[in-house]
Image: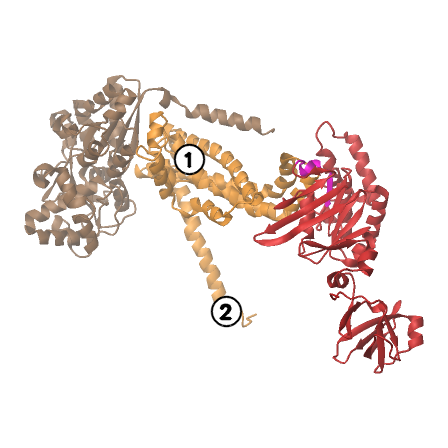
């Protein structure tokens, strides 16, 4: 059993045990404690939390943002990926690195960037104020911040897929007289659809769970600009731990749903290839 | 294409759901600091009941400094109710949102309620903390938020300074004491509520430097008498301040409502509610006598007479590279 | 003139791929673009198809510039080396793709599409695999489907990019015969890219040999094989010995050398190394006094007459005096 190139059995077991304990401590335990905390006062906590106008509004606001941000970023993501793989652009590498920006800078910094751009004293703040358009500390600000942080997910998924083996097929279709829509729908889309779905799931999960960037541009007005994650924080700061946990469990469940969906699409996509 | 109908339907439902009464009904926004959540919940209810106004009052809470920053950046507060006058001052000096003499527009320098800084310790006071000097004993962990971001923390800092000045006299010794004090602080939360949660919920530290109202709230709300309040020999008169933000109320046409709202804080009903939420008040006759019982009389210094006002205090202590930064560096 | 290519220049990232190349293709002709890999022949084909834009120069198809007509409207049938079949569509749908992509006014009815696809499947002798997906087919089958797919749009020009390059030798031979016969039946102007000279000689009416982005020589297979204008052409179209006699280099193929025991005018002394008699011709390997090998191929009757013996010295003389020296 113990070949010289292999780690000794005890080490392997210890590593596996360590990995399990780590997962249990870092993921399962916090998750279980949120659910336990939420259920500590029984069903009453849930009815109280989800009966409150502020919580309902936070859920609606979060869903609305996702409902706009995800389709928009889906279109933008497809367009970016298509452009990157089909058009000769000078400095493609730099642009590709730029696409990573929302991933690589802290969400809080993203929020401040938008305040610096669109806030009252920001670059475009005066212009917006003169026209009576409220962006920061209002719905558009929340949407823009979410759009920004979730922008790369879909494009990132699609670029390697569109860059791959489908290119000659697209050329073949073009020479057979197909228009761009037919090429996209019949040739490109079947190639990218699982990746696209995967990207959409990631994008949705992030847009509903985003805290940092949104927190900065929200203004934390209850019942108006508090998204669900912000509302969880607000309830926690109120010292209302059960309600905070109940609201958080919605986010946790959304997270699990997206995890399961991701796993399924991943398996499907692998089976396809 | 066949998915379009259900998608647009869902979108429609949410759009109608979100453009709810709050945007149609007239509303005012009160941008406040951290530990006033419970207070304003009651105040708002009572105000609406008494004034019979058909409006919505929206609340935003956070660290006092951060909230002021948001208002500067365009958060259109109709009124601000912040932890200290300095945070409102910058709305006048930097933002030009209110006149510079805003503090004279309401009684008591625009402070409808007061508080002070006390110690919250664990049951039985095991580390025997009775006064500011005890905080620098070995093995005492002190919990306070960061004076850079939290109003409450500035009051904590100034209260400690006042004691040190009175007892140690010499400025170098005062600085030594302050440095030692912040050496005992394991985490600097950004807001007072965060520190309360660190101390009470996460059970970190031996003593919490807290607003008196926050400390009393913790004693009442946490089960099993886990905490005790210690009143030091000397503390500071903490004066949260309130103001109408003229720039916003003119735009929203809410000047009248905002004025009534802040006046209500000074009314008998308002004062009684403040006392109930553990704030000291100028007009004790308005309060339920049993709400006044927890307020012990101790020596309180005040910011204007003792520290030369907020502008001076800020420049000496809290501005960039001022005393507090030096203390943190030496820590 | 079906296709006219004028003075095409094309570079990729600073590397010149085509360098002033010109070419004419007549109606109904089948020409082979032959050349070593990297000589620019595939790029040229893609430019003719409209998939790439030349840096300079023009391509006219039936007198119309490629700038004026979109690639999809030009009725170009392009067959890719790796087939580029639509892997999410069945064989039937692959072949029907071009018909369904026609503008609504020209699009045939479903009935006609079925009929046309069936006849094409018949043509490629694969009517029994209509419902399969491309990945379920062999390489040869895939390439035939790819051909049927472009034939469906009744192309005016057929452009084939190393169409048999990825197939094994036997299938390759079979398919190129089949292609030649189909070309004979259909008479579509066809350009065929290959790096295999045998394939080019076998299939094409005319060969255009491309080297370093330029036409090295063009002509019938016979002209190129027997009357090459440069050593490169000579060498590229088949094995060639270079023997130096009296200071001149003669480029002669193995069957263009005579062997004898007596020295004759214009001959060189060679030592016999090996003899292989299997095959249509007998291969005799010889070497000169500098150990440079020379290969000679003799019909069996001539071999019997000369009867070389391993180790002996013979006199070799070129039957064709082909030199490229400047005279």
- Of badges 1 and 2, the one in the foreground is 1
- Asked if residue C83 can be seen in this view, the reply is yes
Label 1 and label 2: CA atoms lie apart by 53 Å
Disc 1 secondary structure class: helix
Residue B214 or residue B21, whichever sits in front: B21
Disc number for residue B36: none
Residue C43 or residue A18, whichever sits in front: C43
Name the chain under label 1.
A
Coloring scheme used? by chain
Q: Which chain is brown?
A: B
Name the chain under label 2.
A
The residue that disc 1 covers is A144
Q: Position of residue B239 (x, y in %)?
A: 15, 34
Mark 1 or mark 2, which has the lower sequence index?
A: 2
- Asked if residue C131 can be seen in this view, the reply is no
Disc 2 secondary structure class: loop
C71 drawn magenta: yes
In the image, C264: left or right of C232? right
Q: Which stretch is magenta?
A: C68-78
Q: Answer above or below: position of B213 versus B329.
A: above
Q: Which chain is orange?
A: A
B236 drawn magenta: no
Dot 2, how many residues are within 10 Å of its Cα: few (below 14), some (14-19), or many (20+)?
few
Q: Residue at point 38% right, 40% down? A: A213
In the image, A126: left or right of B312? right
The residue that disc 2 covers is A8
| Colour in which the image shows chain C | red
Q: Answer above or below: position of B130 versus A178.
A: below
In the image, C29: left or right of A24? right
């Amino acid at each position: 059993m113990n070949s010289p190139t292999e780690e000794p059995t005890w080490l392997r077991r210890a590593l596996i045990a360590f990995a399990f304990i780590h997962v249990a401590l870092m993921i399962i335990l916090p998750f279980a404690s949120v659910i336990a905390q939420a259920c500590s006062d029984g069903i009453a906590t849930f009815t109280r939390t989800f009966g409150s106008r502020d919580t309902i509004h936070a859920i609606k606001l979060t869903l609305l943002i996702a409902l706009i941000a995800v389709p928009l970023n889906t279109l933008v993501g497809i367009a970016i990926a298509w452009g990157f793989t089909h058009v000769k652009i000078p400095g493609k590498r730099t642009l590709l690195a730029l696409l990573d920006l929302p991933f690589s800078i802290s969400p809080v910094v993203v929020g401040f960037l938008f305040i610096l751009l669109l806030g009252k004293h920001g670059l475009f703040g005066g212009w917006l104020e003169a026209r009576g358009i409220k962006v920061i500390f209002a719905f558009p600000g929340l949407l823009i911040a979410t759009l920004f942080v979730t922008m790369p997910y879909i494009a990132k998924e699609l670029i390697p897929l569109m860059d791959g083996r489908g290119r000659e097929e697209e050329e073949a279709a073009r020479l057979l007289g197909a228009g761009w829509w037919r090429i996209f729908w019949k040739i490109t889309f079947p190639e990218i659809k699982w990746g696209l779905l995967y990207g959409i799931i990631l994008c949705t999960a992030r847009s509903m769970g985003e805290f940092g960037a949104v927190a900065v541009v929200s203004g934390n007005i209850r019942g108006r600009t508090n998204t669900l994650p912000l509302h969880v924080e607000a309830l926690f700061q109120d010292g209302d731990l059960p309600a905070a946990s109940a609201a958080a469990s919605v986010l946790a469940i959304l997270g699990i749903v997206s995890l399961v969906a991701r796993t399924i699409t991943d398996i499907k996509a692998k089976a396809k290839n | 294409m066949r998915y379009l109908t259900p998608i647009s339907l869902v979108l429609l439902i949410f759009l109608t759901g979100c453009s709810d009464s709050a945007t149609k009904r007239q509303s005012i926004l009160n941008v406040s600091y951290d530990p006033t959540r419970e207070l304003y919940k009651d105040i708002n209810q009572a105000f609406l009941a008494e004034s019979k106004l058909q409006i919505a009052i929206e609340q935003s809470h956070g660290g006092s400094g951060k909230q002021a920053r948001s208002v500067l950046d365009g958060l259109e507060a109709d009124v601000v109710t912040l932890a200290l006058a300095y945070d409102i001052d910058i709305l006048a000096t930097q933002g030009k949102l209110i006149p510079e003499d805003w503090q004279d527009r309401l009684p008591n320098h625009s402070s409808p309620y007061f508080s002070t800084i006390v110690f919250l310790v664990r049951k039985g006071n095991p580390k025997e903390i009775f006064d500011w000097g005890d905080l620098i004993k070995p093995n005492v962990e002190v919990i306070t938020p960061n004076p850079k971001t939290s109003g409450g923390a500035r009051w904590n800092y100034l209260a400690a300074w006042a004691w040190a000045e009175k007892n140690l006299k010499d400025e170098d010794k005062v600085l030594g004491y302050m440095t030692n004090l912040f050496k005992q602080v394991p985490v600097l939360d950004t807001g007072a509520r965060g520190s309360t949660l660190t101390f009470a919920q996460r059970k970190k530290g031996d003593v919490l430097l807290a607003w008196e109202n926050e400390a009393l709230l913790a004693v009442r709300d946490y089960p099993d008498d886990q905490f005790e309040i210690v009143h030091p020999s000397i503390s500071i008169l903490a004066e949260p301040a309130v103001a109408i933000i003229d720039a916003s109320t003119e735009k929203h046409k809410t000047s009248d409502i905002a004025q009534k709202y802040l006046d209500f804080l000074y009314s008998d009903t308002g004062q009684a509610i403040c006392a109930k939420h553990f704030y000291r008040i100028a007009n004790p006759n308005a309060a339920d006598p049993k709400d006044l019982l927890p307020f012990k009389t101790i020596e309180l210094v005040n910011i204007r007479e003792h520290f030369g006002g907020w502008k001076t205090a800020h420049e000496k202590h809290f501005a960039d590279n001022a005393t507090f930064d030096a203390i943190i560096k030496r820590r | 003139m079906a296709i006219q290519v004028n003075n095409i220049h094309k570079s990729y990232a600073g590397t010149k791929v085509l360098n002033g190349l010109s070419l004419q293709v007549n109606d109904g002709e089948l020409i082979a673009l032959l050349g070593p890999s990297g000589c620019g022949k595939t790029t040229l084909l893609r430019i003719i198809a409209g998939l790439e834009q030349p840096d300079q120069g023009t391509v006219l198809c039936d007198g119309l510039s490629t700038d004026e007509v979109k690639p999809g409207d030009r009725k170009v049938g392009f067959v890719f080396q790796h087939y580029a079949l639509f892997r999410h569509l069945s064989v039937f749908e692959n072949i029907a793709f071009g018909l369904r992509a026609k503008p609504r006014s020209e699009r045939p009815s479903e009935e006609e599409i079925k009929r046309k696809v069936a006849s094409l499947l018949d043509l490629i002798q694969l009517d029994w695999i209509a419902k399969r997906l491309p990945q379920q087919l062999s390489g040869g089958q895939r390439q035939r489907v790819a051909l049927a797919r472009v034939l469906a749009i009744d192309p005016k020009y057929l452009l084939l990019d190393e169409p048999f390059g990825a197939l094994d030798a036997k299938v390759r031979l079979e398919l190129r015969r089949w292609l030649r016969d189909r070309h004979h039946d259909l008479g579509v102007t066809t350009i065929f890219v290959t790096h295999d000279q045998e394939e080019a000689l076998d299939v094409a009416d005319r060969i255009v040999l491309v080297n370093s982005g330029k036409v090295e020589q063009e002509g019938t297979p016979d002209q190129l094989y027997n009357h090459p204008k440069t050593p490169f052409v000579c060498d590229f179209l088949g094995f060639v010995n270079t023997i130096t006699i009296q200071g001149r280099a003669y480029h002669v193929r193995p069957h263009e050398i005579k062997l004898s025991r007596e020295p004759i005018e214009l001959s060189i002394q060679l030592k016999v190394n090996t003899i292989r008699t299997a095959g249509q011709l007998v291969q005799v390997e010889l070497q000169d006094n500098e150990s440079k090998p020379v290969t000679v191929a003799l019909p069996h009757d001539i071999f019997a007459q000369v009867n070389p013996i391993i180790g002996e010295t013979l006199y070799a003389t070129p039957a064709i005096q082909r030199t490229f020296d400047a005279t």
